[in-house]
Image (cartoon, helix red, strand yellow):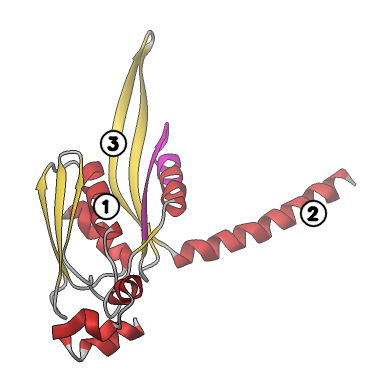
């Protein structure tokens, strides 16, 4: 009898596992950095690992997380869970690039993000590239100035992305039409309105 109850609980757990798998399929995760750290103790050294992971749905949501553990897979799992809890929504123009240029800063890390015409691709370095790929951006030009520390670069990039606004949001804040906001872009007003 006890075994059947255990099996029953396992059955419910397996169903939850399937749901998590589907959720995992929805998100794309990229390992940005893994760092081996050592704690010196009386008997020698205890080694651990710190992981930095970026997660996104390739449709305008992205997040990052850090995880520490004694084993690499566990550190990555913790980082992925934290990244999924810290997702940020970013409005994209035509689902492929940013609406406007942006600056981001975190510590000594400074980044400059620029929207780009179709066919440009992702012109960005290491940690920033991982963010854009998981976010779903196809055309962007980005430059990192200052530190090359992946933690600060990721935070500065997310800071810049948080400042992105779409013409529709700006029009509603200012009580105007989207075409008034876009002005010179002309025909792009309809595309932005649809986005």
Q: Earlier in the sequence, mark 3 or mark 1?
A: 3
Quarter that holds the C terminus: bottom left
Which residue in the rendered view is the most extreme toward the top? 42
Q: Badge 3 is on which residue?
A: 35
Q: Badge 1 is on which residue?
A: 159
Asked where in the image residue 177 lies, by quadrant, the reply is bottom left
Q: Which residues are magenta?
A: 62-77
Contact, CB < 8 Å: mark 1 with mark 2? no
Residue in the image at 54% along x and 66% along y: 22
What whole-number distance in Å separates the C-alpha atoms at marks 1 and 2?
A: 46 Å
Residue 172 in magenta stretch = no
- Considering the numbered disc 1 on the image, is that residue within a helix, a strand or a loop? helix
Mark 1 surroundings: few (<14), some (14-19) or many (≥20) residues within 10 A: some
Q: Earlier in the sequence, mark 3 or mark 2?
A: 2
What label sits on residue 169 in the rendered view?
A: none
Residue in the image at 16% along x and 81% along y: 118
Residue in the image at 32% along x and 63% along y: 134
Determine whether 171 is above or below 31 in the image: below
Q: Position of residue 169 (x, y in %)?
A: 34, 72
Asked where in the image residue 16 lies, by quadrant, the reply is bottom right
Q: Badge 2 is on which residue?
A: 8
Determine whether 47 is above or below 103 in the image: above
Residue in the image at 35% along x and 68% along y: 60
Q: Position of residue 75 (x, y in %)?
A: 41, 40
What whole-number distance in Å separates the C-alpha atoms at marks 3 and 2?
A: 41 Å
Q: Position of residue 101 (x, y in %)?
A: 16, 65
Residue 124 in view here: no
Residue 161 in view here: yes
Frontmost of labels 3 and 1 is: 1
- Considering the numbered disc 3 on the image, is that residue within a helix, a strand or a loop? strand
Which of the two residues, 109 or 10, is positioned nearer the viewer here? 109
């Amino acid at each position: 009898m006890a075994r059947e109850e255990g099996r029953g609980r396992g059955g419910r757990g397996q169903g939850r596992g399937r749901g998590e798998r589907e959720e995992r399929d929805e998100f794309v995760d990229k390992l940005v950095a893994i760092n081996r750290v050592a704690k010196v103790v009386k008997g020698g050294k205890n080694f651990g690992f710190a992981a930095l992971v970026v997660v996104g749905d390739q449709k305008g949501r992205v997040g990052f997380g850090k995880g520490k553990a004694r084993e690499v897979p566990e550190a990555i799992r913790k980082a992925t869970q934290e990244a999924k809890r810290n997702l940020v929504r970013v409005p994209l123009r035509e689902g492929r690039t940013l609406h406007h240029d942006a600056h981001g800063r975190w510590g000594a890390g400074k980044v400059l993000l620029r929207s780009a015409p179709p066919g440009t691709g992702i012109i960005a370095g290491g940690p920033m590239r991982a963010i854009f790929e998981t976010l779903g951006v196809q055309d962007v030009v980005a430059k990192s100035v200052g530190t090359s520390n992946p933690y600060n670069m990721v935070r500065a990039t997310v800071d810049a992305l948080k400042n992105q606004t779409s013409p529709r949001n700006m029009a509603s804040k200012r009580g105007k039409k989207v075409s008034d906001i876009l002005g010179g872009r002309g025909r792009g007003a309809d595309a932005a309105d649809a986005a």
